[in-house]
Amino acid sequence: MPTPSQRSPDARQLRERREVGDRVRFLRRQQGISQERLGQMIGRDRQTISNYEIGRTPPGLDDLVAMARVLGIETWRLFYG
C-alpha cells in the first residue's frame, strides 16, 4: 500500500493547490513581479513558480513563507485570501 506522500492527490487537495496558486499569481501580477523574478527572490526557477501557480506541485512551507514575505502579506493569506 502506498504511503500518504506517494498517493495521488484527491479532488480537495488539487482544488486547494489551485487556490493557493491563484492567490500567488494574483498578488504577483498585482505587484508587477514576473515568475522569473519571484523565483529569483525565493531561490527557485521560473518553472517552479509556474508549477505552484497552476497547482501542479504544492509549494513547501519554506517557499510559502518566502513568497508571502516577498509579496508583503502574512503567510496564512495564501490559504484563506
Image: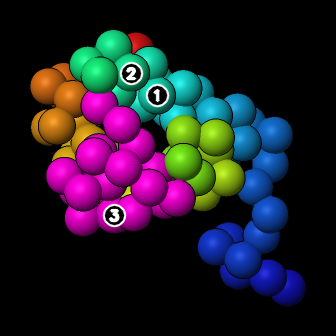
Nearer the camera: disc 2 or disc 1: 2
Residue at 36% in and 37% down: 34
Residue nearest the viewer, comparing 3 with 11: 11
Residue at 40% in and 15% down: 81
Residue designated by label 3: 44
Q: Residue furthest right?
A: 1
Dot 2 amino acid type? Arg
Mark closer to the chain start, 3 or 2: 2
State whether residue 69 appears in this view. yes
Q: Is 62 contained in the magenta span?
A: no
- Tell me which segment is drawn in magenta: 33-49
* 76 lies above or below 9: above
Disc number for residue 59: none
Dot 1 amino acid type? Arg
The Cα atoms of the two marked residues, 3 and 1, are separated by: 15 Å
Question: From the viewer's perspective, is 28 left or right of 69?
Answer: right
Disc number for residue 29: 2
Instruction: Find out whether the residues at labels 2 and 1 contact each other: C-beta distance under 8 Å.
Output: yes
Question: From the viewer's perspective, is 51 left or right of 12?
Answer: left
Residue designated by label 1: 25
State whether residue 27 appears in this view. no
Q: Is 47 contained in the magenta span?
A: yes
Residue at 24% in and 57% down: 40
